[in-house]
Amino acid sequence: MVTPDLTGEEDIAKLIIPNDLPKEQPALTAYIVAKVYDKEGHIIRYHRQPMRSPTQWLLALTAIPLIGTYSSSSSSTANSFLVNVLGMPSQQYTYPAESPNSANLSWDFSIQLGSSTQAFSPTLNSLAAPIANGSGAGQLSYGSVTATYSGTTIYTYVTVVNYSSTTINVTEIGLVVTFYIQFMNSSNAYQANTYTYLLTYDTFSPAITLPPGAIATFEVAISFSG
Amino acid sequence: MPEDAYDIGNHVPTFNAYLTAIVRDSEGKIIKVHRQRSHSPTANFIGLFLPMAYFSTNNVSFTLTNTGGSTCTYQPGLESSSKDIAYPNTGANHNTYIVMIQVGSGQQSNPYTATALAAPIANGSGAGQLVYQPVTLPSNITINGNTAYFYITQTYNNISGSTITITEVGIILELQVTNYWNTSSTNCGNMLVWYDVLSSPISVPNAGSVTIYYTFAVNP
């Protein structure tokens, strides 16, 4: 195919996000599973749906294993993507500056549940009405997040319990990433600065209902085409 | 993905990667535009994508393999003995950065297990070689409506004296892991993190060039 020369970013954008390619498996797909058990342990709801709404923060996470953290082979500053998109420092201070101490980057996932809905935007960074961790009215007790991996799929789970005396309706769910930059601070003590972003946002319709005493497990599975 | 979780409506897939190659002749005119979906994160990529919970829950590490076939242990965490991705700092630096979009003239059937291109095209002006220009990193994410994307691009000049054919493309990351004490630092070397076989070969004429774009998009 021969085309006129490219004159600017708009021309390039038309070529690099083509809309006329045949439908094939995307590079990443994901689904959500919710299982609800009553207080006797009987399963009372099983729900599975595709994940539809990745945010720009999922893109940002994807970029790190592709482009790394440094701007080049000889620089001691971060690439501008991490600084501009994720708000990370261009250079992390570590005590003392001339010592062999270093700094590093890692991340973890969590699952946040909510009780409202909102319009999607790729810049979305929180649920409309997050359900707090606790045993009070309108709260759920969140267990530890676990993650497993098999082949090209990463599974993230959380179990919640409704210790309150009223039914709680879960209508939104988000997969959340927290980045940790670890270093030695000016007091020569360990410190980790955190940066938290919403990777995906999805809604349940109808709601996932947890009566008093119910236990529910929510799973987000991310599959790469591999 | 389980069958009952497939979206059976008209919804467009929500995360896609694309590979675009623009070939120019000796006068700089575009003579071919190649576009295809990109499918293939490698096992190295998926290992690096995993959250800390995977490592702490299962008390495991992930073995990465570099382009030379050597292995490296990756075990991110918040412990002093963890092996995390190095971050730029005022002390000891262990540069982790994209080396290049590498092009090659071979192919392999299982991109997931690929740790190197089958037949990398060397950087140079000799027979069968291409001159690699520096890779251009994204500095931000572009947003247009619900679509968000970034791209990585690199240009290659052919001054070898004859046409060169590209059949495979991959992203190479130089990875170094460390803890904050800097006592577990390891240079893992060049890692193939993304790999694609071209749906049709690309011929770069002598004195011509090719520019490759890897685009990653959500809600395209």
Image: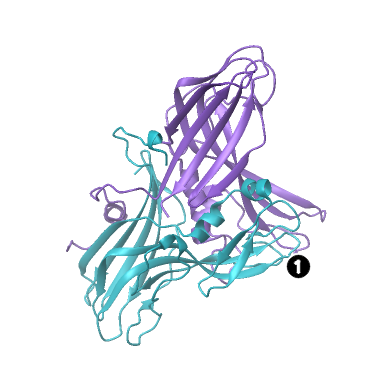
Chain colours: A purple, B cyan
Q: Position of residue A154 (x, y in %)?
A: 52, 46
Q: Quadrant of the C terminus of chain A?
A: bottom left
Q: Pick whichever, A182 or A154, lies toward us.
A: A154
Quarter-of-image position of residue B154: bottom left
Residue flagged by tag 1: what amino acid is it?
A: Pro
- Residue B96 visible in the displayed image: no
The residue carrying mark 1 is A100
Task: Please state if A129 lies on the left or on the right of B181 as rendered.
Answer: left
Q: Secondary structure at mark 1?
A: loop
Q: Position of residue A54 (x, y in %)?
A: 44, 40
Task: Please state if B217 lies on the left or on the right of A172 as rendered.
Answer: left
Q: Position of residue B39 (x, y in %)?
A: 37, 55
**In percent of the image, x 35 and y 35: which residue is there?**
B7
Q: Residues within 10 Å of mark 1 (few under 14, many from 20)?
A: some
Question: What is the count of numbered marks?
Answer: 1
Q: Pick whichever, B20 or B40, lies toward us.
A: B40
Quarter-of-image position of residue A164: top right
The relative height of residue B101 versus residue A218 in the rendered view (above or below) is below
- Residue A79 visible in the displayed image: yes
**In percent of the image, x 56 and y 56: which residue is there?**
B48
**In percent of the image, x 30 and y 85: which residue is there?**
B160
The relative height of residue B125 versus residue A217 in the rendered view (above or below) is below
Task: Please state if B17 lies on the left or on the right of B88 as rendered.
Answer: left
The relative height of residue A107 versus residue B67 in the rendered view (above or below) is above
Q: Residue furthest top?
A: A165
Q: Position of residue A114 (x, y in %)?
A: 55, 25
Q: Chain of mark 1?
A: A
Q: Quadrant of the N terminus of chain A?
A: bottom left
